[in-house]
Image (cartoon, helix red, strand yellow):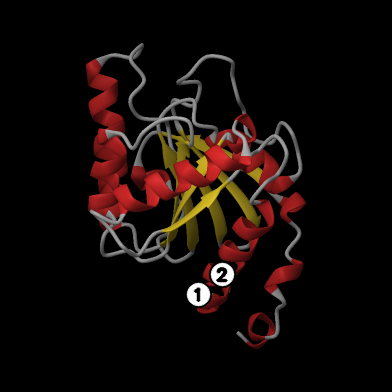
């Protein structure tokens, strides 16, 4: 415990991220006594690219040109007992209804019951509007205060349009959950990356007792 109390979380080397495994069942996650940060959102919002930007390694998280590339839950580890969890994107039309329902069930179960879940990062395309499935997730996470919405692909908009869209998302999201931090982000030019790392470091510091 003592060595983690003295740890400077700002010095965590995210380049140490390594892929652990892909799973399709919650029971295959590590023992429920660790720190997990979940990356969720619609297909093609850039979850895997965000993990790549966080690590500084382009291909640590697999990305594809077609939406829905991530079909399993992917686990990445940074340090002992600290994991990033990349969930399959929801809302992709070219998968069966059975698989859609399975993904939804797994995500809902994970959010509701997983004790190791210490932070949720919801990726959204800043150019779009707040969508139904995002609203459903926001409602389910209302009791979990450690949430960030990343308005990804901010590099596609001018500064003026980014300001307008961020205000729009803030006004819409606070109708359902007023405890969510909202940031513009780009995995292309790393806008918002320092803020993201700082937020994750805070989540780690709040849960140092789990880093054993």
Residue ID for mark 1:
207
Residue depicted at 69% across the width and 57% down the height: 194
Q: Quadrant of the C terminus?
A: bottom right
Residue depicted at 23% across the width and 51% down the height: 139
For disc 1, the neighbor class at 10 Å (few under 14, some 14 to 19, many from 20) is: some
Residue 204: assigned label: 2
- In this rendering, the answer to whether 2 lies above or below 147 is below
**Residue sitting farthest toward the front:** 160
Residue 70: assigned label: none
Which element type, helix, strand or loop, lies under badge 2? helix
Distance of label 2 from label 1 (alpha carbons): 5 Å
Which element type, helix, strand or loop, lies under badge 1? loop
Residue depicted at 29% across the width and 22% down the height: 99
The one nearer the camera, 42 or 4, is: 42
Residue 103: x %, y % from top left: 31, 32
Residue 2: x %, y % from top left: 65, 88
Q: Is residue 59 left or right of residue 24?
A: right
For disc 2, the neighbor class at 10 Å (few under 14, some 14 to 19, many from 20) is: many
> Based on the displayed image, in which of its 4 quarters is residue 62 positioned?
top right
Total count of labels: 2
Q: Are marks 2 and 1 in contact (CB under 8 Å)?
A: yes
The one nearer the camera, 197 or 192, is: 192
Q: Quadrant of the N terminus?
A: bottom right
Residue depicted at 33% across the width and 25% down the height: 91
- In this rendering, the answer to whether 38 lies above or below 123 is below
């Amino acid at each position: 415990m003592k060595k983690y109390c003295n740890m400077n979380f700002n010095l965590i080397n995210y380049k140490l991220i390594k892929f652990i495994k892909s799973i399709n069942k919650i029971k295959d996650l590590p023992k429920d006594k660790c720190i997990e940060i979940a990356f969720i959102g619609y297909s093609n919002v850039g979850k895997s690219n965000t993990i790549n930007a966080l690590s500084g390694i382009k291909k640590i998280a697999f990305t594809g040109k077609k939406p829905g590339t991530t079909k399993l839950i992917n686990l990445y580890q940074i340090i002992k007992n600290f994991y990033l969890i990349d969930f399959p994107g929801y809302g992709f039309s070219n998968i069966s209804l059975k698989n859609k329902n399975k993904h939804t069930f797994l995500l809902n179960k994970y959010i509701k019951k997983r004790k190791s879940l210490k932070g949720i990062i919801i990726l959204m395309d800043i150019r779009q509007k707040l969508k139904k499935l995002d609203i459903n997730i926001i409602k389910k996470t209302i009791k979990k205060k450690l949430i960030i919405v990343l308005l990804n692909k901010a590099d596609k908009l001018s500064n003026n349009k980014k300001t307008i869209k961020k205000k729009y998302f803030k006004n819409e999201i606070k109708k359902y959950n007023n405890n969510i931090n909202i940031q513009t982000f780009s995995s292309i030019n790393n806008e918002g990356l320092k803020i993201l790392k700082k937020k994750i470091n805070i989540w780690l510091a709040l849960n140092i007792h789990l880093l054993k």
